[in-house]
Amino acid sequence: MSGLTTHVLDTMHGRPAAGMSLRLLRGDRVLTDAVTNLDGRLDGPLLAGPDLEPGGYRLEFRVGEYFRDMGAPLPEPSFLETVVIDFNVTETGGHYHVPLLVSPFAYSTYRGS
C-alpha cells in the first residue's frame, strides 16, 4: 500500500482519539480536511499513493478543541491548541504513516509503518 496515513492516540484517556479534526497542507494549500473515526484513524488515506509526491507537507491536529470536547480541564488558553508536524516525503509511491500520541500537555510522533 502506498500513500499517507495517520492515527491519533489520546494518552490522557488511554484510547484512540475519536473525533479529532486535522488537516494536511502542502505549502499554503489545504489538501485534506478530516476528522478521525472511532479508532482514531481516517476511513482512507490522507493522500493516495499517486498523489503523494516528494516534498514538504504539514499535518495540523486540533488537539485543544478535541480535549475541550472531551471535558478535560484545560487552562485558558490551552497549552497545546494545534499540534503541527512538518515532514518530508522522499519516495514517489512510498507509504508514510505519521501517528500522533497526545495529551493536553505533551505529544510525540514518529514515522510508522
Image (cartoon, rainbow, N blue to C red):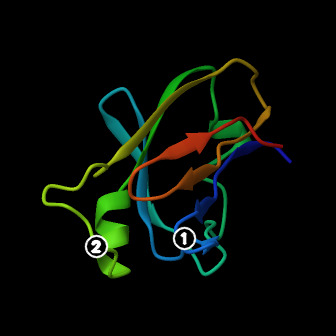
Circle 1 residue: 17
Q: How far apart in space, not on screen, are marks 2 and 1 (Cα)?
A: 17 Å
Element at label 1 = loop
| Residue 66 tag number | none
Q: Position of residue 89 (x, y in %)?
A: 65, 24
Residue with the most extreme left position: 76
Circle 2 residue: 73
Which tag, 2 or 1, sits closer to the chain's start? 1
Quadrant including the C terminus: top right
Q: Amino acid at mark 1?
A: Ala
Residue that appears at 29% across and 66% down: 65
Q: Position of residue 78 (x, y in %)?
A: 22, 56
Q: Position of residue 47 (x, y in %)?
A: 61, 47
In front here: 20 or 27?
20
Q: Is residue 81 left or right of residue 66?
A: left
Q: How many marks?
A: 2
Residue that appears at 51% across and 46% down: 107
Element at label 2 = loop
Q: Is residue 22 left or right of residue 78?
A: right
Residue that appears at 52% across and 67% down: 12
